[in-house]
Image: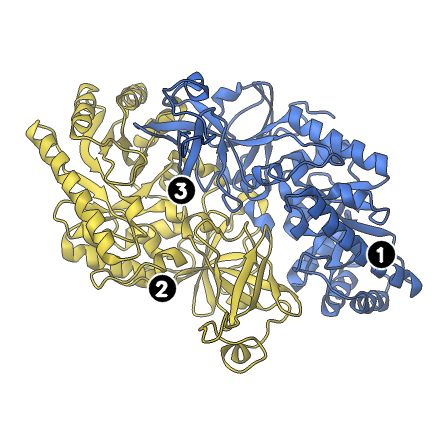
Chain colours: A blue, B yellow
Amino acid sequence: MSSSSDAGASSAEPGGCAAPAAPGDRLERVDTPALILDLDAFEANVAALHAHAAARGVRVRAHGKAHRCPGIALRQVAAGAVGMCCQKVGEAEGFADAGITDILLTNEIVDAAKLARLAQLARRVRLGVCVDHPDAVRALALACAQHDARVDVLVELDVGQGRCGVASVDEVLALARAIDRAGPSLRLRGLQAYHGGAQHLRAPAARAQAIAAAVGRVSQARDALRAAGFACDEISGGGTGTFAYESGSGVYTEIQPGSYALMDLDYRANEADLAVPAMRQAIGVLVAVMSVRGGHAVLDGGLKAVSVDSGLPSVRWPGWRVRGVSDEHTVIEPVVADRAGGTGGTAAGGSGAAAASGVPTLGQRCVLDPGHCDPTVNLHDWVVAYRGERVEAVWPVLPRSASR
Amino acid sequence: MSSSSDAGASSAEPGGCAAPAAPGDRLERVDTPALILDLDAFEANVAALHAHAAARGVRVRAHGKAHRCPGIALRQVAAGAVGMCCQKVGEAEGFADAGITDILLTNEIVDAAKLARLAQLARRVRLGVCVDHPDAVRALALACAQHDARVDVLVELDVGQGRCGVASVDEVLALARAIDRAGPSLRLRGLQAYHGGAQHLRAPAARAQAIAAAVGRVSQARDALRAAGFACDEISGGGTGTFAYESGSGVYTEIQPGSYALMDLDYRANEADLAVPAMRQAIGVLVAVMSVRGGHAVLDGGLKAVSVDSGLPSVRWPGWRVRGVSDEHTVIEPVVADRAGGTGGTAAGGSGAAAASGVPTLGQRCVLDPGHCDPTVNLHDWVVAYRGERVEAVWPVLPRSASR
């Protein structure tokens, strides 16, 4: 996979603010806070996923919601992804502008103005979208007719997530008929069947069991569609926590993980399964020490640099841990054993890891590992891609308006 | 206060994405998710704060970290704020570019590259900054000398927050001497003394007690500075939860609340104090129903539209509540009584509020009230300012890179 500094670096300044680094910079000179991407880890994750998928005969359609970064998406496609998944029309537009030609909106779009943009986009890339309501099918068909566009349609089946998607085979068939009646602008491709709730079940057996149940529901719906004369060529689903089970099911044709390329603490907290390639922590939030007090130090990135919805970040500083995160600050403190026999380590200044790592000094850089990668990358205008200690490329993240 | 649609509206497109609305649009047509600002509530909050401060003889320096929106900052200054507070050099640059001429960085800046930008900024606006370490004083003085700039300096005193700031009078005096030795580029103005930890103590008595302790420490430091021949003309601090106590202390000269103008669930959860003007909920996140299932509905904004670090948002839909928030979705469900005698209301379809409010339909708009305003506004490129049901102005939010 190519990662040359020119193949995605940009001198554009989203919103008028300069990038935090330039290709060739040493990592320690990157302006903070900054979202950094370890290219060695990223490339290893992408290679591991594609080897896994190739061995099982399923396609990879990487989920772009994890990063919203065209520079990353282009490398995922170059490595063999058939295209990208998006959740939002704005994300799809941004990826299409960057040269991604095959996009699946793994989400329902029902607003007329958004459907008009979707139909216009479908005239320049291959585009798929999900439906879970007959009104949405009619609105989609109308928009496509107005713009002379064709889109692929997946019926979203709720396989345990409890969010979007229809729950019964009867509803799947009703939507298939609605798509069929809508005319040639809509082409029924199959089923969207993502089980978000299974991704972070800690025990592999629990994840396997959840996906086995999903596979049962998917098979039933697929068979019913085919028995009624409908096509069901594509069954897409599977995230970073479960893709091994979907890809080994013999039913899913396509997996759509996103976090695997970047990783975060929440996915790392899943218990390992030998069937699943281990992914490396590729992203981090580079911050700098801005205040050193008696029992703690303060880092210059907070809630606007790292998301805490899935728990506090950790700090890559042996002997130190995160005490708290506020809007613009993260406070770290020495790890101390919480009680006799505790395994928390030793206080800074004592012997062991903390003393070995030393006490933070003003201006020193360190890295936070986020609890949740998707909303963390979304807090940054730029991804600083580095190898070793050297910046290779700086890629813009789509604007926040991509949420629309 | 002026809120005309032209005095802050912008047709600029940060990052290349169009604004979600235009002046004159009806609120129900605004593209979602969007950050919306009720101008009547905002103006009432600003007026209430200034009346309160004027009656107590303290200045208002509104904190711009709450919104990072120059359109809002300009209106706070027009209403009588002496200037703005910022946490980041990037925020200060953005506000200066928009015409704010008096800015206090209520934060420590220690990085050489950031200090160079700070010194350059100080050549075009009145600029203050905080210090809590003698090394930072030296670095600041060096940057100012290199750029022939002058800055005001506040020594940050830790008055209970436990984050940045020195803890002892001796340290305050040592920093005052360092500022003095640094020469004419640095002017000691006084003390930064913000107690973040007191803002959300629920009981008014607890907040009053925390600030009384802070006032004691501030008085001691101020008296010591003056006894040693140093100036201490400005004592700045006080947030939305406590400004009434700082402003009534006779010691603080300036208050720096930010959230008061916008408000959020966390501040609304504070028990009311008669001494504090009640602030109205002015911001919300406009979302649309994208899926309607049996027992729940799905809204088209999630963690990338509303921050959950201070708890889940609430939904302005009588009889419904938020079940959960994921990256791009918020799931709402009917309120049901949790147990016999519970006060949670009734299920949708039954009698009472839920039935009166009806069941969500596809595409319908509703509003989420965020738990925490600062990181929520930071998730949006635009603030849609409205009055009644009509959009009056659409203001850009500073880019995410303002975190640097």
Dot 2 amino acid type = Ala
Q: Looking at the rendered structure, which numbered label has been put on residue A219?
A: 1
Residues tagged by mark 2 and mark 1 found on one chain of the structure: no
Name the front one of labels 1 and 3: 1
- Mark earlier in primary sequence (1, 3): 1
Camera-nearest residue between A259 and B92? A259
**On the picture, is B275 further left or further right than B331?**
left
| Residue A13 x %, y % | 53, 35
**On the picture, is A100 further left or further right than A353?**
right
Camera-nearest residue between A140 and A271? A271
| Residue B175 x %, y % | 20, 25
Chain of the residue that carries numbered disc 2 in the rendered image: B
Q: Can you tell which quarter of the image residue B55 is in?
A: bottom left
Dot 1 amino acid type = Ser
Residue A314 in sight in this render: yes
Q: Is residue A39 above or below residue B338?
A: above
Look at 59% across and 71% down and name the residue there. Answer: B360
Q: Name the residue under label 3.
A: A326
Q: Name the residue under label 2.
A: B41
Secondary structure found at label 3? loop
Dot 2 alpha-carbon crowd within 10 angstroms: few under 14, some 14 to 19, many 20 or more = some
